[in-house]
């Protein structure tokens, strides 16, 4: 029989966008125009976006980060350059040729860019993942005149934090203007600084609803929202994100944060991209397997370095080199494709 299509029409004053689809089919999100206008006003003041600016995005415009950056540029009267290619390395030349001044990108996209230093870029705005030390160094080398801002957020929340070069790399910044952050335990009680818990936010930028799809980890409590990510606040208000609830697994009776292990691997300057997956294991609960894309030494050298840093419960049982890194249109790693690649490689 016929499959009914969901009603994807945006109500007056609202619009639709897509989630990143990192671990499954992208969800369609409905949000209010005013929610993005709030962040656009903040970023326009902070980044000096004007009709003289040339703003570039590297992701497909069907996804939230690239769409937001493009709308921001147009609202501010700036030139908008939507750059998208399966060969990301080639886009560095486009950034240079077009004299881009403001660049929006994910950490994975930044790692894959390769070119001599590009002088025109004044601001790099990074979201959609952790900006590890190696990626940060690569960004400074590639864009020597740029100030880097990294932010943390979700398609359901828009901006949650914003941090500049003065923010510790282990953190994702302070609360974005207009945002309040709380770390809560399982009983929804606010936790003291330095304590891990579920990240809750309230702001004028929260989404309205899912039009298609849903997430069991997205929950509301009055004006507050959590998308199921774990983190902590320090005494200065810097937020550190440990990872998503569904990316916390049990290995030999110990809780392991897969995103934290990825950050350790990505910190190696010879690693362009990394992903850690947990496969079922009868003895230990889960077995960790890592996939890496390398830019330098042999895989054996990477394994030795990682094993020297990580404790036994957090060491991947296997580390597999992937030559052609699978990416989603949103600029994030395609974990589903990687899982298939890993399972084929370890058979």
Image: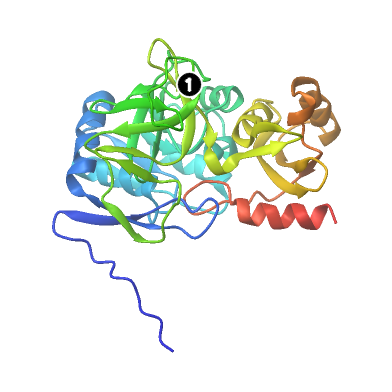
Residue farthest along the front direction in this orientation: 187
Identify which residue, 145 or 45, lies in the foreground.
45
Camera-nearest residue between 38 and 315: 315
Label 1 Cα crowd, 10 Å radius (few <14 / some 14-19 / many 20+) = many
Q: Could one spot residue 201 in this view of the protein?
A: yes
In the visual, does 325 lie left or right of 37?
A: right
Task: List x then y, in percent, for residue 283.
Answer: 83, 43
Please name the residue shown 54% across and 24% down the image.
136
Task: Indicate the quadrant containing the N terminus: top left, top right, bottom left or bottom right.
Answer: bottom left
Residue 191 x %, y %: 42, 20
Please state which of residues 322 and 27 is positioned toward the viewer in this rendering. 27
Percent position of residue 236, x then y: 39, 10
Residue 101 visible (yes or no): no
Residue at 31% over, 45% down: 68
Q: Give the vertical position of 243 relative to 21 (above or below).
A: above
* Residue closest to the far bottom: 1
Q: Is residue 37 left or right of residue 228?
A: left
Point out residue 74 in the picture as x, y percentages from the top left corner: 23, 45
Left or right: 134, with 150 as reference point? right
Q: How many marks?
A: 1
Helix, strand or loop for disc 1: loop
**Image: 286 above or below 296:** below
Q: Which residue is mark 1?
A: 171
Q: Residue 189 falls in which quadrant of the image?
A: top left
């Amino acid at each position: 029989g016929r499959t009914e299509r969901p009603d994807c029409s945006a109500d007056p004053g609202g619009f639709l966008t897509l989630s990143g689809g990192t671990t499954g089919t992208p969800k369609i999100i409905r949000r209010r125009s005013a929610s993005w206008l709030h962040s656009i006003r903040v970023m326009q003041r902070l980044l000096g976006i004007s009709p003289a600016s040339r703003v570039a995005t590297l992701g497909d415009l069907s996804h939230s980060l690239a769409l937001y950056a493009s709308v921001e540029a147009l609202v501010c009267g700036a030139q908008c350059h939507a750059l998208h290619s399966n060969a990301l390395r080639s886009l560095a030349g486009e950034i240079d040729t077009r004299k881009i001044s403001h660049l929006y990108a994910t950490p994975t996209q930044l790692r894959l860019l390769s070119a001599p230093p590009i002088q025109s870029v004044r601001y790099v705005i990074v979201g959609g993942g952790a900006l590890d030390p190696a990626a940060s160094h690569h960004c400074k080398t590639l864009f020597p005149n740029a100030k880097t801002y990294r932010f943390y957020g979700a398609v359901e929340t828009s901006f949650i934090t914003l941090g500049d070069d003065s923010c510790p790399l282990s953190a994702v910044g302070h609360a974005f203007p207009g945002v309040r952050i709380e770390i809560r335990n399982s009983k929804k009680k606010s936790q003291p600084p330095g304590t891990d818990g579920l990240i809750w936010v309230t702001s004028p930028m929260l989404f309205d609803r899912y039009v298609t799809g849903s997430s069991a980890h997205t929950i509301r409590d009055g004006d507050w929202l959590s998308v199921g990510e774990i983190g902590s606040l320090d005494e200065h208000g810097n937020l550190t994100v440990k990872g998503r609830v569904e990316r916390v697994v049990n290995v030999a009776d110990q809780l392991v944060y897969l995103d934290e292990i990825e950050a350790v691997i990505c910190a190696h300057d010879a690693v362009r991209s990394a992903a850690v997956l947990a496969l079922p294991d009868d003895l230990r609960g889960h077995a960790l397997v890592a996939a890496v894309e390398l830019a330098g030494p042999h895989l054996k050298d990477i394994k030795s370095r990682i094993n020297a840093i990580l404790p036994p419960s957090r060491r991947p049982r296997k580390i597999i080199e992937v030559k052609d890194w699978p990416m989603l249109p949103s600029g994030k790693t395609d974990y589903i494709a990687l899982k298939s690649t890993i399972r084929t490689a370890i058979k």
